[in-house]
Image: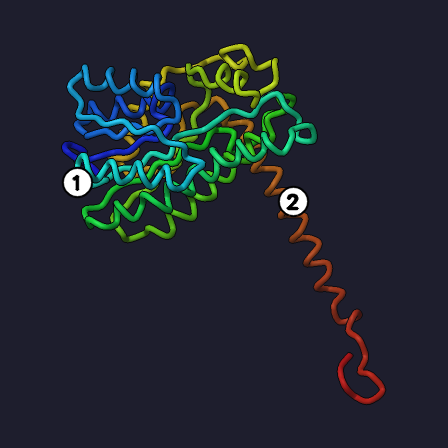
C-alpha cells in the first residue's frame, strides 16, 4: 500500500508504547485511526494526543483476548470511517523473570490469551473487513526479536514462545493472502522505550527483577521510530520488520545450530540407506511379506 491517505487503520494496544507510536505514524501518513486498548484512561489520553495533531480518530475499549470485543472494534471502525484497510495486531503483555516450570496456569492463560489469541482474534474478525471492500490492505502482527531466539538467563521462555507463535502465524497468513492485494508484516522489535516491563510487573506477569522500567536492556529506541519503520514496511510490502541489527549474531548462531542438526540428520539418513538391503525382512513362511 503506497498511498495511505484517507484510509483507515485499527491498532490494538494503542494507548501507549509501540502501539501509540505506530498509531501516531499512521496518522501522520494521513490515515484515519481506530485506537483499541483495554485501559480506558490511557486510551482517552492517546485519543486526545492524536486528535490534537489533526488526526481523525475514534477509540474503543477492547480486550483482544475476547473475540466479541475485537469484533466490536471492527464494527466501530466501519461505522466511523466506512472501511478498514490496515490492521495492526499489536497488543501484548510481558512474561519475563518467571521460569517456565514455575509459571502458574493463570499466567500462561493470560499471556497466551493476549499475545497469541489476540492476534488470532484480530485475523478472524478484522481481516474479512479488509477483504470485503476489495481495495487491498495490510496486516501487521507484532512479535518480537524474541520470536527468533530465547535470551539465556532471563527466564523469558513463556514470552518468547508466544512470539515464536506470532511469527509462524504471520508466515502462514502471508501465504494465505498471496495474490489478494493484502500485504502481511511481522514486527520484531528489539528494545523500545515503553512502560512494558513496569506494566507487566504490576499485573504479576513478570518477576520482581523486571520492575526495572528498562527491563535490563540498553540501546532502546523511541516508539515513534518503530512507528516510522512500520509505515515504511507497509508502503514497501516488507514481511519481516526489524528495528535493531545488534542481535544478528545470536539469531545466526541459532540458525547455524539448526543447520548442523539437519546435516547430522542427513548424514544418518544416508548411513541408514546403505544398510537398508541388509535390514529387509524375509517373507513369512506362507510367502506373504512380513
- Kindly report the distance in space between the C-alpha atoms of the residues bearing marks 1 and 2: 51 Å
| Quadrant in the picture for residue 54 | top left
Residue that protrudes farthest toward the top in the picture: 212
Which residue occupies 37% across, 52% down?
Answer: 176
Q: Relative to residue 249, is residue 169 drawn left or right?
A: left
146 lies above or below 206: below
In depth, the one of 146 and 256 nearer the eye is 146
Badge 1 element: loop
131 lies above or below 72: below
Residue identifier under label 2: 261
Percent from the top left, x then y, of residue 48? 24, 16
Percent from the top left, x then y, of residue 144? 46, 29
Percent from the top left, x then y, of residue 8? 21, 35
* Disc 2: CA contacts within 10 A as few (<14), some (14-19) or many (>=20): few
- How many numbered discs? 2
Q: Nearer the viewer, mark 1 or mark 2?
A: 1
In depth, the one of 7 and 48 nearer the eye is 48
| Quadrant in the picture for residue 232 | top left
Q: Relative to residue 59, is residue 210 drawn left or right?
A: right
Which residue occupies 38% across, 51% down?
Answer: 175
Q: Quadrant of the C terminus?
A: bottom right
What color scheme is it? rainbow
Residue identifier under label 1: 82
Amino acid at each position: 500500500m503506497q498511498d495511505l491517505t484517507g484510509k483507515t487503520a485499527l491498532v490494538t494496544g494503542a494507548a501507549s508504547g509501540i502501539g501509540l507510536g505506530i498509531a501516531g505514524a499512521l496518522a501522520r501518513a494521513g490515515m484515519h485511526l481506530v485506537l483499541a486498548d483495554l485501559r480506558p484512561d490511557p486510551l482517552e489520553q492517546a485519543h486526545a494526543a492524536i486528535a490534537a495533531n489533526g488526526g481523525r480518530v475514534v477509540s474503543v475499549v477492547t480486550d483482544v483476548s475476547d473475540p466479541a470485543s475485537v469484533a466490536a472494534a471492527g464494527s466501530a471502525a466501519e461505522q466511523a470511517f466506512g472501511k478498514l484497510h490496515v490492521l495492526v495486531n499489536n497488543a501484548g503483555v510481558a512474561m519475563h523473570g518467571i521460569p517456565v516450570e514455575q509459571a502458574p496456569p493463570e499466567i500462561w492463560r493470560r499471556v497466551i490469551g493476549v499475545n497469541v489469541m489476540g492476534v488470532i482474534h484480530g485475523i478472524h474478525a478484522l481481516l474479512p473487513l479488509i477483504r470485503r471492500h476489495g481495495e487491498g490492505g495490510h496486516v501487521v502482527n507484532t512479535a518480537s526479536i524474541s520470536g527468533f531466539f530465547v535470551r539465556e538467563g532471563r527466564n523469558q521462555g513463556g514470552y518468547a514462545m508466544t512470539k515464536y507463535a506470532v511469527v509462524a502465524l504471520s508466515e502462514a497468513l502471508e501465504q494465505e493472502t498471496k495474490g489478494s492485494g493484502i500485504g502481511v508484516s511481522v514486527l520484531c522489535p528489539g528494545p523500545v522505550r515503553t512502560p512494558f516491563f513496569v506494566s507487566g510487573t504490576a499485573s504479576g506477569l513478570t518477576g520482581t527483577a523486571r520492575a526495572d522500567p528498562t527491563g535490563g536492556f540498553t540501546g532502546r529506541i523511541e516508539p515513534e521510530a518503530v512507528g516510522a519503520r512500520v509505515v515504511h514496511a507497509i508502503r514497501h510490502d516488507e514481511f519481516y520488520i526489524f528495528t535493531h541489527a545488534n542481535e544478528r549474531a545470536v539469531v545466526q548462531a541459532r540458525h547455524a545450530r539448526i543447520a548442523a542438526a539437519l546435516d547430522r540428520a542427513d548424514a544418518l539418513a544416508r548411513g541408514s540407506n546403505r544398510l537398508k538391503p541388509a535390514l529387509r525382512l524375509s517373507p513369512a513362511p506362507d510367502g506373504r511379506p512380513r
